[in-house]
């Protein structure tokens, strides 16, 4: 762990690990107590993990495996968690696509930023 933190480009590895650990912790708490605040914590921390490093998208598969295979969650709760998991993924996809678009042909906001400089 010391090498990942000491090397500046490697810092995102420890950050994404923290985000994934805490988002999974909130997911486990939500499965136990089913409080909306815990589901919100899971969503926000998962979104933070996605914005830290793209590899965090693997959390979708970890979540699916846990709630279906290990926890044997009822279908109504699976649908709720699936929707909550897909929301950060969709936000991340839109933000990533907006950032990668050509400012001259992409959406309006990057084009306005490009023209202002």
Image: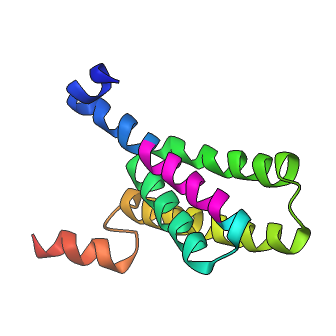
Residues 89 and 102: in front is: 89
Give me the residue at 31% from left, 78% from top: 109
The residue at the point 41 percent across, 66 percent down is 98
Residue that protrudes farthest toward the top in the picture: 3
Q: Is residue 52 left or right of residue 3?
A: right
Residue 80 sits above or below residue 8 on the image: below
Q: Residue at x 29, y 35 (%)?
A: 11
The picture places residue 90, in percent across and down from the top left corner, at: 58, 67
Nearer to us in this view, 79 or 55:
79
- Find out whether residue 24 is within the magenta segment: yes
In the image, is 24 to the left or to the right of 66? left
Give the main secondary structure, helix, strand or loop, of the magenta stretch.
helix
Q: Position of residue 59 (x, y in %)?
A: 62, 48
Q: Quadrant of residue 30?
A: bottom right
Is residue 70 part of the magenta span, yes or no? Answer: no
The answer to whether residue 7 is visible is no
Front position in the image: 44 or 57: 44
Q: Tell me, yes or no, if residue 67 can be seen here.
A: yes
Residue at the image point whose x is 60% and y is 71% from the top: 39
- In the image, residue 44 above or below residue 1: below
> What stretch of residues is rendered in magenta?
18-29
Question: Quick one: 51 or 114, which is closer to the camera?
Answer: 51
Q: Which corner quadrant holds the N terminus? A: top left
Q: Residue furthest left?
A: 117
């Amino acid at each position: 762990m010391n090498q990942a933190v000491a090397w500046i480009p490697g810092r995102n590895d420890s950050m994404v690990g923290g985000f994934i650990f805490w988002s999974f912790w909130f997911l486990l708490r939500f499965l136990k107590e089913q409080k909306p605040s815990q589901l919100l914590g899971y969503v926000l921390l998962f979104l933070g993990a996605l914005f830290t490093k793209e590899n965090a998208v693997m959390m979708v598969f970890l979540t699916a495996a846990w709630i279906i295979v290990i926890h044997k969650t009822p279908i109504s709760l699976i649908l709720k968690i699936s929707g909550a998991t897909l929301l950060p993924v969709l936000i991340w996809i839109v933000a990533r696509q907006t950032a990668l678009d050509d400012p001259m042909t992409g959406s309006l906001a990057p084009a306005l930023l490009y023209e202002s400089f």
